[in-house]
Image (tube, grey):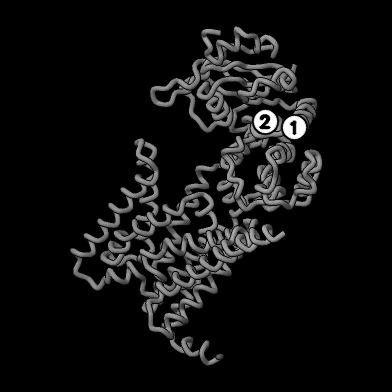
Amino acid sequence: MSDPVIEVRDLSVRYGQVQALDEVDVVLEPGRITGLLGMNGSGKSTLYKAIMGTVRPAAGSVTLFSGTPAAARGKGLVAYMPQSESIDWDFPLSVHEVVMTGRYGKLGPSRRPRAIDKAAVTDALARVGLTELAGRQIGELSGGQRKRVFVARAIAQEARLLLLDEPFAGVDKASERRIITLLRELRDTGCGILISTHDLAGVPELCDEVILLKNRVLFHGHPDVALSPENLARVFGLEAA
Amino acid sequence: MIDWILEPLQFAFMTRAALVTLIAAVTCAILSCWLVQIGWSLMGDAVSHAVLPGVAISYILGWPFAVGAFIFGAGAVALIGGVRATTKIKSDAAIGVVFTGLFALGLVIISKTPSQTDLGHILFGNVLGVSDADIWQVVISGVLATAVLLFKRRDLTLYAFDRGHADAIGINTRWLSVLLLGLLALTVVVALQAVGIILVVAMLITPGVTAYLLTKRFDRMLWLAVLITVIAALAGLYASYYFDASTGGCVVLAQSVAFVLAYLFGPRGGVVVNWVRSRRVVVA
C-alpha cells in the first residue's frame, strides 16, 4: 500500500478554554473519498486548519504525504475548496483568473503565467464544463457552477489532496451529480479527497468511508455503519433517539 | 486654451506640486484597489494619522521626514495587530484606540516644540511649498512602492480574494500582509506631502472604489484607478491655481466628483443606469 495522504496522530487543538480537537487520529489513504461528518462546532474546520497548518496544535502531529504539511503545501499537493459564504462573489475576477490561481505555486515570484499554465487552465475548465463561461465574472455563475470553478482550480493545480468544505450547499441536483462524477474521476487517479458536510443524504453514494467527528473521532469506517441510528445519535447528540 | 494649460507650469512651485501630487496620487490609487477589496480602508486612515509624531520628531532631529513617518506608520500597524492578537477588542476599536493615541502624541510634541514646523502644513498638506529634498523622498518612496505593488500584484489579489487558497499552496500570507501594510506606510509618507494627513485616506479609498464601480476585472480596475486619479489630480491642480484654493482639497474633491459620476452612471450598478434599465423592463 502506498503512503497515506494524511496522517494525523494524537492531535489536540485548544482555543483558550475550548477544546476544539481532542486526541484525534485520522489516516487517509490515496484514492479514497472520505466524508467528515459532524455538527457545527464539532471541530471540522479546526481539523482542516490543522491539516492546512494555519492553526497551531497543542499536541500531536500532522503528516501529509509522509512529510510536513508545509512541504506538501509548497509542492502544491493540497487544494482547499472554501465554503461559498467565505468567498466575496462580487470580487472583480473572471472564472479563468480564479482557476489560474491554482497554478501560482508553480510560477515565479510575480506569478506571470506561461503557455503551459494557460493550457492547464483551459483543460481544467473543459473538464468541469465551464469553457464557455471562462470570461464571466465569478458572481455571474449559478451555485453549482461556482463550486465547479474551485474543482477546476484543484485540477489545474494538479493537487493530490482535496479538502472540500460543504461542497453541496446551495447546489442543484444536476450540478451535484456532475461534481460527484468529477470527484470520482480524481479519486480514480489516486487523489485523496476529504469532504466535510452535515448533509447526510448524499453520503453513502459519494463516500468510500466516513469519519464521525465530535471534537474526537467517534467512528471511522464504512458509510453504512457510520449512518446507523446509534452512530448518528452519538455524533449529532440526539440522546433521546 | 494652450496658454491656459501652460501658464501655471511657468512657475517652478507648480511643476513641483504637479510632480509630487501625481506620484502620490498614482501610488495611492494602485494601493487603494487592494485596500478596498480586503476591507482595510480604515487601516489607511489609521496609518496616516499615526505618522504625525514621526513627522514631528523627524523635524526636531533633522531627519528626512519619511524616516520618522515610516517608523511610526509601521509601528502603528504593529501595535494594532498586537492589540487585536492579545485582547478580545474588536478590530475597528483596536484601530481607533491606537491611531488616535499616536495622533494625540504628535499634537503634544508639536505644541511643545518651538520650531518652524507648521501643524497646518502637515495636517492639510503644503504641496506648493515642497523642497527639493522632499521631492526626492517622494519620488524614491513612490516609485519603490509602485514597483513592488505591481510586481506582487497577482499574489496580493489572491490574498485579497481567497487567503485560504494562498495558504494551501504554500504562499506565505503573513508575509504578504506585512508587505502590504509596509507599503501602506510608505505610500502614506508619499501622499502626506501632497494632501496632508487628513486627506490621505481619501486618496487611499476613492480611486479604488470608483474603479470598482466601472469594471468587473481587477487588472482593469488598477488601470482605471490610475487613469481616474491622474485626471482628478490634474483637474484639482488647475482648479487650485485658477481659483486660488487649497491644492489638496481640490485634488480630493475632483476624485470625489469622479466617484459621484461613477456612482450615478457606472455600468456596474450605476444608480441612473439601473433606473433606466428597470424602466426599460417595465416598458417591455
Residue contact at pointers 1 and 2, CB within 8 angstroms = yes
B108 on left or right of A14: left
Q: Residue furthest front?
A: B283
Query: Which numbered circle lies on residue B284?
Result: none
Q: Viewer-proximal residue, A216 or A85?
A: A85
The residue indicated by pointer 2 is: A168
Mark 1 crowdedness (10 Å alpha carbons): few <14, some 14-19, many ≥20: many
Kind of residue at disc 1 = Ile
Where residue B1 sits, quadrant-wise, is bottom right
- Chain under label 2? A
**Measured from the top left, where is residue B224 in percent x and y?**
60, 65
Q: What secondary structure is found at the residue carrying circle 1? A: helix
Task: Give the answer, above or below, for where A241 lies relative to A73.
Answer: above
Q: Which residue is mark 1?
A: A179
Q: CA distance from mark 1 to mark 2?
A: 9 Å
Say if B59 sits above or below A122 in the image: below
Asked whether residue A107 appears in the rendered view, the answer is no
